[in-house]
Every structure is written in structure tokens, then in C-alpha cells.
Image: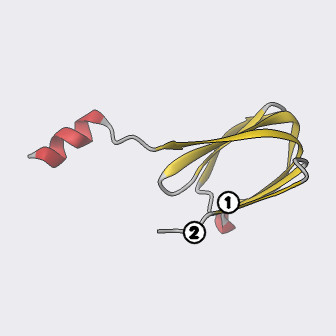
Amino acid sequence: MERNEIHILNQEHIEISGIRTVEGFDEGGIYVTLENESLMVYGEGLHVDTLEIDDGKLEASGRIVSLTFEKKKVKKKLRERLKR
């Protein structure tokens, strides 16, 4: 399992390591995929300062309001195949 780290400084700067992909971002949120879950960073005036996909690192600034994690769901067809 890959290690993920999140560092937040004064709700104004965030550093995330262990990201796999960035699904999207705008001033209101940043949506990234980690190894076994997704992470949504909600905020105001968010700006991606550094993005290094090969190294799995992202840094952003702005007003960070909240973080939400969501476990990846196994697709129904895959679950059916695993039962066989």
C-alpha cells in the first residue's frame, strides 16, 4: 500500500503526496485519486501551485475549507466475476 501524506498550513496551503491522478480542479475544489480512495479538497480561491504526477505530489494554495475522502467502489460487473 502506498503511503499518502497531507500537510495543511493555516488553512491556506496544502501539500498532498501519494496521488495517482488529478480528476479536476477549479477555485472551489480539487479532486484527486489516491491508491484506494479519492480525495476532494474544498475551498475558496484554490490554485494548484505544483503538480508532479510522476512523483505523486500536489501543492495548492487558497482558503481550505474541508477535505472529503471516498473509498473506491468495485464495479458491479467486477464483483460478479469475483464471486464465480
In the rendered structure, which amino acid carries the disc numbered 1?
Ile
Quadrant assignment, res 16? bottom right
Locate residue 65, reporting x and y percent: 80, 37
Query: Compared to 41, does 20 lie above or below?
Result: below
In the picture of the structure, the residue carrying the numbered disc 1 is 53
Which secondary structure lies at badge 2? Answer: loop
Locate residue 30, reporting x and y percent: 73, 40
Outermost residue toward the left?
84
Locate residue 34, reporting x and y percent: 56, 54
Query: Compared to 1, does 46 lie above or below?
Result: above
Q: Is residue 53 left or right of residue 36?
A: right
Locate residue 26, reporting x and y percent: 79, 33
> Looking at the image, can residue 57 be seen?
no
In the picture of the structure, the residue carrying the numbered disc 2 is 3
Q: In the image, what residue occupies the spot 24% across and 36% down?
A: 77
Q: Tell me, for residue 68, which label it has, or none.
A: none
